């Protein structure tokens, strides 16, 4: 329709009619969507502008995107550089006619970033609150543990220096500071970050000065203006006076975010996840690949899930699922080598909670010691999240712990839900676990999967790698748990009933 309108307008102009004779507004159209995504790895993109008017172009001041407009061809060209940061960014381009204007948003995703390994750390703090709160707790991968001191150093500035394990594949692009969610005393305020590289490890360069983390209980990601290849030491300085209470330091986790280093001669392909799951209503999920392949591609085995590529991300989308859990696999391939298989599952509205009975465990604490709501493993399947199983502590019971459950009516078993102690978790929150399954045709348990519940206080949804039929028993081996214990308020089993 629009094109016909332009042709009519052009004919009118050719016929010598003055524009004022016909109060038809100028047409100016690029499609219904005015946001255009450009690849995070950089690209040149042309957008056809449907208009009869002479347009002028104004752009926001973004040095990463050169935007031009060819009035003769009516083509808007965006020449976007690679986004060398984990952060998304966008800019605008406005096309203006005599009587109207159209503003387009040009959006670019950031690069997928992995957590770089920390080889060690030192600080000017002479006394941590106790060994359980020392500096290593800020890089043990668990947000349930934290670094804490109640004493300020003589200088009044906490200095923490982390050594990164050498990794030529990635460049340090930013730091994610994870406070304790309760934001207690010592939650940090102002942060200065200095970095040195492997070739001159004692020569620090200041990248961020007095970034205000505002003493909040949520993570603060601080992106650098440029990523640093070969980063070796990272020094974090925090004035004691800027922390909550003014005299303490508390940090649950520090994550050093590395993006693919384009200067690396080694080819690499590192998927940031090997599984994804969708809610029964459907939705989308994104899998990042840290790679220096020029491009990636993805293929999905089943058509209920679709994959599109945005830079080095694979975006997966699924519609609603009215059946029980469905699964598929996505194969992602790099143009310069490397591939990964991602297991995708989607919960369905027909998923059913199965009945578990006869729980046994490697150990359980007595209600005399734990209190009337805690101890016996039967509390893990009583349907009440206020009661919980706790491994023994009055007598020694070292990890690994385990608990075993009989399923009474499982035609199939698809996934488990693990609820730590409610409402806020505590000792025994599951970390790394193994799931073992015995079906009617197995003589003994068969290893089904490993899973990391992360010792977090919130529920974990553990999707099995396949649908298991005729399951008799499930055994959970708890290799790590908060404080070395295992505890569980409820373990739920889902699939289809017999
Ligand atoms: Ca319970």
Image (spheres, grey):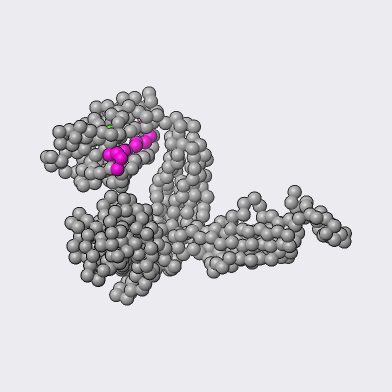
Dominant SS in magenta: strand
- Image quadrant holding the C terminus, namely top left
Quadrant for residue 343, please give it.
top left
Measured as percent of width and height from the top left, residue 194 is found at 34, 70
Residue 445 can be seen in this image:
no
- 377 and 375: which is toward the camera: 375
Determine which quarter of the picture holds residue 147: bottom left
Q: Is residue 180 left or right of residue 272?
A: left
- Measuring 37% from the left and 72% from the top, which residue is drawn there? 206
Q: Name, please, the residue furthest toward the front.
A: 245
**Residue 346 in the image, given as x and y percentages of width and height:** 44, 38
Where residue 399 appears, as percent x and y from the top left, is 19, 43
Q: Nearer the viewer, residue 189 or 438?
A: 189
Instruction: Please name whichever residue, 316 or 294, is drawn nearer the observer in this view of the structure.
Output: 316
Which residue is at 20% across, 32% downward? Answer: 372
- Is residue 9 visible in the rendered image? The answer is yes
Residue 116 relative to residue 31: left or right? left
Q: How many marks?
A: 0
370 inside magenta stretch: no
Magenta highlight range: 412-424
Front residue of this view, candidates 362 and 106: 106
From the viewer's perspective, is residue 177 above or below residue 347? below
Please tell me in which quarter of the rendered image ligand 1 is found: top left
User: Image point 12% across, 40% down: which residue?
Assistant: 395
State the residue at coordinates (40%, 53%): 272
Residue 57 in the image, given as x and y percentages of width and height: 66, 65
Relative height, residue 412 to residue 86 (above, below): above
Residue at the left extreme, as displayed: 395
């Amino acid at each position: 329709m629009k094109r016909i309108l332009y042709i009519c307008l052009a004919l009118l102009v050719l016929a010598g009619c003055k524009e004022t004779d016909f109060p038809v507004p100028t047409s100016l159209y690029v499609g219904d969507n005015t946001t255009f995504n450009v690849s995070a790895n950089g690209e040149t993109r042309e957008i056809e502008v449907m208009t009869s008017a002479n347009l002028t172009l104004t752009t926001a001041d973004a040095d990463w995107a050169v935007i031009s407009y060819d009035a003769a061809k009516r083509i808007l060209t965006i020449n976007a550089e690679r986004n060398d940061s984990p952060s998304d960014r966008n800019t605008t381009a406005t096309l203006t006619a005599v009587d109207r204007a159209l503003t387009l948003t040009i959006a670019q995703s950031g690069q997928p970033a992995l957590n770089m390994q920390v080889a060690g750390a030192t600080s000017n703090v002479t006394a941590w609150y106790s060994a359980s709160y020392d500096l290593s707790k800020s890089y043990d991968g668990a947000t349930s543990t934290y670094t804490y001191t109640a004493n300020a150093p003589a200088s009044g500035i906490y200095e923490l220096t982390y050594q990164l394990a050498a990794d030529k594949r990635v460049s340090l692009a930013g730091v994610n500071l994870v406070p304790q969610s309760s934001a207690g005393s010592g939650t940090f305020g102002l942060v200065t970050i200095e970095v040195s590289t492997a070739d001159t490890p004692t020569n620090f360069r200041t990248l961020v000065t007095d970034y205000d983390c505002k003493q909040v209980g949520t993570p603060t990601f601080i992106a650098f203006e440029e990523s640093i290849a070969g980063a070796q030491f990272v020094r974090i300085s925090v004035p004691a006076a800027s922390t909550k209470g003014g005299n303490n330091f508390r940090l649950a986790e520090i994550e050093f975010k590395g993006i693919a280093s384009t200067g690396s001669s080694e080819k690499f392909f590192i998927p940031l996840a090997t599984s994804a799951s969708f809610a029964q209503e459907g939705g989308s999920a994104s899998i990042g690949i840290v790679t220096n392949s020029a491009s990636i591609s993805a293929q999905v085995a089943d058509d209920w899930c679709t994959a599109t590529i945005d830079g080095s991300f694979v975006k997966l989308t699924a519609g609603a699922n009215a059946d029980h859990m469905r699964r598929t696999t996505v194969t992602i391939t790099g143009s310069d080598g490397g591939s990964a298989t991602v297991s995708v599952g989607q919960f369905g509205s027909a998923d059913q909670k199965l009945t578990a009975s006869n729980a046994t465990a490697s150990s359980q604490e007595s209600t005399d010691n734990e209190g009337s709501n805690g101890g016996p493993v039967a509390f893990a399947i009583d349907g009440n999240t206020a009661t919980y199983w706790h491994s023994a502590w009055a007598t020694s019971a070292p990890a690994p712990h385990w608990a075993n459950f009989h399923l009474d009516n499982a035609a199939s078993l698809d996934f488990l839900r693990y609820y730590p102690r409610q409402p806020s978790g505590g000792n025994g929150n599951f970390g790394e676990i193994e799931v073992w399954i015995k079906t009617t045709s197995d003589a003994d348990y068969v290893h089904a999967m490993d899973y990391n519940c992360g010792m977090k206080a919130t529920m974990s949804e553990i999707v099995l790698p396949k649908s298991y039929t005729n399951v008799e028993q499930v055994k959970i081996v708890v290799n790590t748990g908060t404080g070395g214990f295992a505890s569980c308020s409820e373990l739920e089993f889902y699939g289809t009933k017999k």
